[in-house]
Amino acid sequence: MLRYLIKRSLIAVITLLMISITTFWLFFAGSANPAAQMCGAKACDAAKIERINKSLGLKDPIHEQYGRFMSGIFTGREIGEGADAIKCPAPCLGVSFRTSEPVLDIIERGLPVSASIAVGSAVISVLLGVSLGIASALKRGGWLDKFSIGFALTGASLQIFFLGLLLQMVLVYQLKIWDRPRYVPPSEDFLGWLSGMSLPWVTLGVLSAATYARFARAEMLEILSEDFVRTARAKGLTPRAVNIKHALRASLSSIVTIFGLQLGGLLGGAAITETTFDMPGIGKLAVKAVGDDNLPIVMATVLLAAFFVVLFNVIVDAMYAVIDPRVKLS
Amino acid sequence: MADQNPYLQVKDLRVQFKTEDGVVKAVDGVSFAVERGKTLGIVGESGSGKSVTSLSIMGLHNRKRAAMTGEILVDGRNILNLPEEKLREVRGQQVSMIFQDPLSALHPFYTIGHQIVEAHQVHHKVSKKESRKRAIEMLDRVGIPQPAKRADQYPHEFSGGMRQRAMIAMSLVNNPNLIIADEPTTALDVTVQAQILDLLLDLQREFNSAIIMITHDLGVISQIADDVLVMYGGRAVETGTVESVMRRPQHPYTWGLLSSVPSLHGDANEDLVPIKGNPPSLINLPSGCAFNPRCRYAMLGDGRPCDLEIPQLLQVQERGHSVACHLPEQERVQTYQQDIAHSGVAQ
Ligand SMILES: Nc1ncnc2c1ncn2[C@@H]1O[C@H](COP(=O)(O)OP(=O)(O)O)[C@@H](O)[C@H]1O
Ligand code: SF4
Ligand SMILES: [Mg+2]
């Protein structure tokens, strides 16, 4: 177990390093011109661009810039020169090229928004999708089963930006029966948080529930035909015990697999979701930063996403080991 | 004979499944009986309806999907009419099952001990602790060393033979009166197979239970069974005591089975001849005798009966021995004595 954790952490660190180098290199290999973006549309002469480039070291060799970035994470650094210099204490991920605010602060502001969306919609999609899938497998061919097949098909073909915008338009702006999507910290106003998050949660949750329902149904049907389920029935167990203790328990590891895949997808989807609902989360931040050539924020959001993917993998592996005694972490 | 009240009586059992391809007549009018303390062997190639028969006795078919007629009397009660709650009392307590592949028949996520305890608790209102004591006792009884330690291990941590012993311990934990073993040794190698059969015989003597031993291997039958039922295409084609059916078989299919099995004491150079052709589709059985396309002795054409009439299972001269074949008995006896008993080849 300990060996597993050490090994996984090492792999994680190496992965993150590689990703940071790649991102850095890709940024400069492209047509990014952060100085021009910072200096604004008007009153921007070559001298000013020169000054910005110099003060941020943007024309230095890439490996030097990368070195500065990395050392900033451990030691903190001062960015810019002279009177304009900004203190960025460790762990410093740089400052925004646009607002000069330390990136870490910006991330800290966006993270709760993204986390709220992800956790809330994950809870809805797992609960709704898995129970729908299982119920329809148990009553195969019944009306619930037919509904769930239709639901899975519809859900798979709808996109979040389409359904999200549609619901917003109709429910929020035309009928005015649903709260406008917005984020308030739950610590300040719990009910406000719930109602502000509800539309993104429901939209994203129901859409991904379709995937869960489809997988859970297929998995459950397969498990119901397994020999050990027949054994459970041959023991004289009640249908409830057979279904829950034997069949459902056995389907858990595949449900966890989908869960891991979906969580990864949720990150990718965060950009679209947050843009659709105009929520100031990490995804929206990343999209804007890419458009603005705002390197420090691009770096930070990419690394954060990579970190979570690695973390989810470890969690999913650990869950396998807990669920299935045949799996050993190594 | 104490045949007045056999523990299990199956009368004219028919089981049909409606599928997209048509109606599967998996069991088509089969009757047999087993007394306590006795073993009935059911033998036949795969797909002959053996497992479907055994699952019917446990009431394990989905009643919506399987159409069942006839009678299955367990201790006088007809399984086919019992409501689900009553069936659950029968399952695992009065009748229990041992399956072919214990690795897939045991739940991979629960320890052996847990699964046996569960089987005991369904039918006994006792503490978990007592059930566990009973489980360990049973593991010990079926010959698993260090039973208390092994109880806490998972099925995948057992060897094939030990796993089947554990499965037997689980099936016997409630002292069932009837044990149905569906190819319990097929997945095991020969030495382990013999040990498992010995164990079953031992336990049978101890608990005086009835056993139905399902197999495609006549060698197993001759080792363990008192009576035998030969099935082909969902029907009984020959039945009787092991002594009469194995020594003086009268059905060409049984001849084929016998010559495709190595005799346990025979020499290794014996010719083993698998029966030519494939078992029939149970959706579309050959007309008349279902065996006729594969039968060397089939009487076909010119109004002869083998593809026209289904042969009835009729008693032969020997007591308790019945055969379903259109060949006259005299001819069958002679053919077997002249052609088959010596050459070992039925075709
Ligand atoms: N639930 C079912 N639905 C449809 N067909 C079935 C079902 N169970 C068994 N069968 C069919 O019944 C026939 C007999 O099967 P089975 O009793 O398992 O044979 P075996 O003698 O090998 O145990 C096979 O053709 C099988 O495909
Ligand atoms: S009835 Fe005819 S086809 Fe069937 S086993 Fe007898 S001889 Fe062969
Ligand atoms: Mg079978």
Image: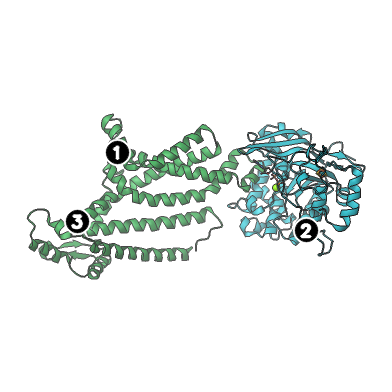
Question: Which residue of the protein is positioned furthest toward the front in this rendering?
Answer: B302
The answer to whether residue A4 shows anywhere in this view is: yes
The answer to whether residue B291 shows anywhere in this view is: no
Crowd around label 1: few <14 · some 14–19 · many ≥20 (10 Å): some
Residue A206 or residue B274, whichever sits in front: B274
The type of colouring in the image is by chain
Q: Nearer the viewer, mark 2 or mark 3?
A: 2
Q: What chain does badge 3 belong to? A: A
- The numbered disc on residue A101 is 3
Identity, as a three-letter code, of the amino acid under mark 2: Ala
Tell me, yes or no, whether the two marked residues, 3 and 1, touch with CB atoms within 8 Å: no
Q: Nearer the viewer, mark 3 or mark 1?
A: 1
- The numbered disc on residue A165 is 1
Element at label 3: loop
Residue B82 or residue B276, whichever sits in front: B276
Q: Could you tell me residue A15's position as x and y percent?
A: 37, 64
B84 over A278 or under it: above or below:
above
Residue A172 or residue A140, whichever sits in front: A140
At 45% from the left edge and 49% from the top edge, which residue is drawn?
A258
Identity, as a three-letter code, of the amino acid under mark 3: Glu
Separation of residues labelled 1 and 2 (CA atoms): 70 Å
B171 over B87 or under it: above or below:
below
Separation of residues labelled 2 and 3 (CA atoms): 79 Å
The answer to whether dots 3 and 1 both sit on one chain is yes
In the figure, is residue A236 to the left or right of B318? left
At 30% from the left edge and 30% from the top edge, which residue is drawn?
A177
* Residue named by callout 2: B194
Q: Could you tell me residue A158's position as x and y percent?
A: 37, 40
Q: Which chain is green?
A: A
Q: Could you tell me residue A310's position as x and y percent?
A: 39, 58
Residue B176 or residue B269, whichever sits in front: B269
